[in-house]
Image (tube, rainbow, N blue to C red):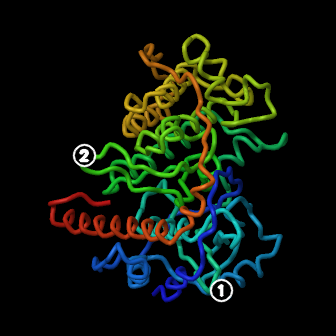
Amino acid sequence: MMSCFPCFTSQKSSKRVSSSTRGQSPVAHTEHPPVSQNNNTKPKAETTNEQDASNGNIAAHTFTFRELATATKNFRQECLLGEGGFGRVYKGKLENTGQLVAVKQLDRNGLQGNREFLVEVLMLSLLHHQNLVNLIGYCADGDQRLLVYEFMPLGSLEDHLLDISPTQKPLGWFTRIKIASGAAQGLEYLHDKANPPVIYRDLKSSNILLDEDFNPKLSDFGLAKLGPVGDKTHVSSRVMGTYGYCAPEYARTGQLTLKSDVYSFGVVLLELITGRRAIDTTRPPEEQNLVSWAQPIFRNPKRFPEMADPLLQGDFPVSGLNQAVAIAAMCLQEEASVRPLMSDVVTTLTFLSMAPAGGAPSPLPVQYPTSEEETSSDDENDQDEDSAEERQRAVAEAIEWGSQSRANNIGGQDGSGSTL
């Protein structure tokens, strides 16, 4: 099925650095064939890992480069949906089925390398939820790396919240809460339903895609990591992600937990409430960092309405806004351990999206963030990130995750385990 995968060993992975990406590939739900039950993996051998991936661990369809070139009219400019550090995304139409797709073509000299490509293919082939993107297929012809998703015409949250034109209708309050609730449900699935849990690590407005009814889906899983299991409290990782969205303890120590995603969600929720970017250098210095700007307002609930996006023109329930701001404040606490679970966030946001006349929130005894640590990484580690060892570890983790999730599926069918 994946005879092209062994070629990964011949090409050095490109460097991945922090970047804020616009125009992510729009996608929607699609069905995948059952994942193979082959669990004979050998994580210590890179070639074995990639061969195992090619022997049935990935359920996505394989495309030839010629098929995708035809679908996108030879990657014409008129088909371009967006571009970023990873490369470009094109709108296409599959010749055999007539299905509209979004084709993500990785730049061979860009910021997303073989490691991220492998992780995204493996993860999205095994994770299935209404609020996660679903992979149709991929191409690994020669040195070409492409991912194929079903097309979603509304693009990303960023396009409708932060990059709107004067003639574009702004998102209404309840549409914003609906998007927040759906994104939270996607994270809840990764944290609580997937086994082992998955840390998304790259939540931001440009990675939340919208279908025609503004239902959100999380996209771009190239930075996803398996979460801590057993007695472990965190996983250690080189600091990756986007400045302004990274949790301060992760930026400071490289220690990654599920609560790191909770912080990033708090930033996105704050963007939805305010219509402001996480980092906006066009604003006055004291307002350029969204979380730092919000801190003094968090401490005074009477000022919460001041945070509302002016484009809403006051058309929102004050009690609902107060509760949404309180949720954001909880998610953005400096101490990771006191941030809420995503399941609790989902419960509250689901209520807010369905009950516009909800009661006023009680004051929350929380400690609010006092500083924003700058995301940084050591340039000396760039070659390590691109190394075969790093790529090998990523493949081994994803295949191990797939093996365990398949075992859980079997157990769940017998009533003895959970299913994804």
Q: Which residue is denoted by mark 2 in the rendering?
A: 231
- Element assignment for label 2: loop
Residue 111: which disc? none
Cα distance in 3D space between marks 1 and 2? 47 Å
**Residue lying at 44% horizontally and 37% vertically, measured from the top left:** 350
- Quarter holding the C terminus is bottom left
Q: Nearer the viewer, residue 177 or 75?
A: 75
Number of numbered labels in the structure image: 2
- Sequence order check: which comes first, mark 1 or mark 2? 1
How far across and how far down the image is residue 144, in percent? 65, 80
Q: Which residue is denoted by mark 1 in the rendering?
A: 67
- Quarter holding the N terminus is bottom left
Q: Is residue 68 left or right of residue 402?
A: right
Q: Is residue 149 above or below residue 236?
A: below
Report the residue that reaches farthest toward the front: 380
Q: Amino acid at mark 2?
A: Asp
- Classify 10 Å Cα crowding around label 1: few (below 14), some (14-19), many (20 and above): some
Q: Nearer the viewer, residue 383 or 47?
A: 383
Q: Is residue 195 left or right of residue 365?
A: left
